[in-house]
Image (spheres, rainbow, N blue to C red):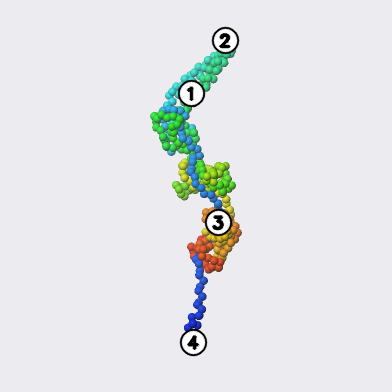
Amino acid sequence: MAGGAYYYLEYWGGGMQAAAPSKPRVQSVQLAKAEPGTIRVEVEAVGTAQARQAVDLVALVSGRIIEIRFKPGQQVRKGEVLVRLDDAAERAALDEAAAALKEAEFAYNRARKLKKNNTISQATVEKQEAAVNSGKARLDLMEKRLADRTIRAPFDGVTGLQRVDVGARIDSETVITTLDDLSQIEINFSIPEIHFSKIRIGKPVEVRTAVFKNRVFKGKVTDIDTRIQEASRAFKVRAVLPNPDGLIPSGMFMHVSVLIAEQRAILIPEEAVIAEGGSQYVFTVAEGKAHRRGVKLGQRGKGKVAVLNGLKAGEEVVRLGHHRLRDGTLVKTGEAGAQKSGAGAV
C-alpha cells in the first residue's frame, strides 16, 4: 500500500507541475507620422464644357452662296467675312439710290440759290430738302441690304463644320456653320444643397478630364443659382476657366473640384482613426507598445484628417493593423510601416 500510494502521488504530483509561461504576442503594424500641414476641403462634381460664346451662323436674308471664305476649325476674327451671297441686285439698287440722292442734292442746292433771289417759294425749298432726306434714308437702306448679303464673324472664335456649299440657296433658318469662342470655357454643374452657404463667387476650382489625364485646368466660380432644385436637392453653379490654347472643346465631360475651405492643423491619414460610440481615437506607439489616444478631429480631405486635439507633431500613429490592438499591446514595425503622412497642403 505504501508503494502504491507513493506512485500515485508522484504521478499526479508530476502532472500538477506548472507549465512555462508563453511569450506575449507581438503585433505587426504600419505607422504614419503626425505632421503639420494644410488640409483642403473640396466638393466634387461633374459638368460639361461650353464655349464662352457660341452661335449657329445663319444668314439674315435668303440668297445663293457665291463664296465661302472659311475652313472647318479655322480661327477667325470679329468682322471677318465668312460667306458672300449673290448681291448683284442689291449693288444695282445701291447705285440707283446713290444717283437719286445726288440728283436730289443738286436740286436742293439750286432751290436754295433761287430762294435767295426770291425766284421760288420757301415751300419749294423745303420740298427739295425732304427729297434729299428721303434719298439718304433710301441709300442707308440699300447699303444695309447689301451688307446683309455678306455673313461676317460676330466675335473671335473657331468655326465648326461647313454645312453648305457654293451655289446652294439658303434662308434665315439654314445653319452655315457654328462659331465658338474657346478662349474661355464655361462649366455648369450641380452641388448638393448642404454646401450652399460655402460656395461663393470667386472660389477657385480645379477641372480635370479623361482626355488630358495629367493636366489640371484652374478657374473660378462666376455664377451661383439662387434656387435649389427640389427634385435633386442641389443648386447649379457656373465656373469659367482660361482656355488660351483651345484644348478644351465645347461639350467635353469634365470633373470639377471646388475648394470650400482650408485649415492648418496636424494631419494624419483617415485610416488611422477608429470611431467608437461617437468618439474617435488612434493608437500611438512608444517603447514598442501601442497606446490608445482619444483625438478631436477637424476637416477631412483627400485621405487626410485634421487633428485639433490629442496629438502633437512628430508623434507616430498606427496606420494599418490597429484592429488587432489593445492598449499596451506589443508592436513591431518594419520599413514598410514607417510611412509618413506628409506635410504641406493636401
Quickly name the residue at label 2: 119
Quickly name the residue at label 4: 5
Real-space Cα separation, disc 4 to disc 1, in angstroms? 139 Å
Q: Amino acid at mark 2?
A: Thr
Per the image, label 4 sits on a secondary structure element best described as: helix
Q: Residues within 10 Å of mark 2 (few under 14, many from 20)?
A: few
Pinpoint residue 193: horizontal percent, then vertical percent. Answer: 56, 47
Real-space Cα separation, disc 4 to disc 3, in angstroms? 71 Å
Residue at the outermost bottom position? 2
Pinpoint residue 240: horizontal percent, then vertical percent. Answer: 52, 43
Look at discs 4 and 2 and give the one toward the viewer: 4
Seen in the picture, residue 250 relative to 30 is either above or below; the reply is: above
- Nearest to N terminus: mark 2 or mark 1: 2
Seen in the picture, residue 339 relative to 128 is either above or below; the reply is: below
- Nearest to N terminus: mark 4 or mark 1: 4
Q: Residue at x 53, y 60 (%)?
A: 272
Quickly name the residue at label 1: 142
The numbered mark at residue 114 is: none
Real-space Cα separation, disc 1 to disc 3, in angstroms? 72 Å
* Quarter of the rendering occupied by the C terminus: bottom right
Quickly name the residue at label 3: 305
Look at discs 1 and 3 and give the one toward the viewer: 3
Look at discs 4 and 1 and give the one toward the viewer: 4
Real-space Cα separation, disc 4 to disc 2, in angstroms? 170 Å
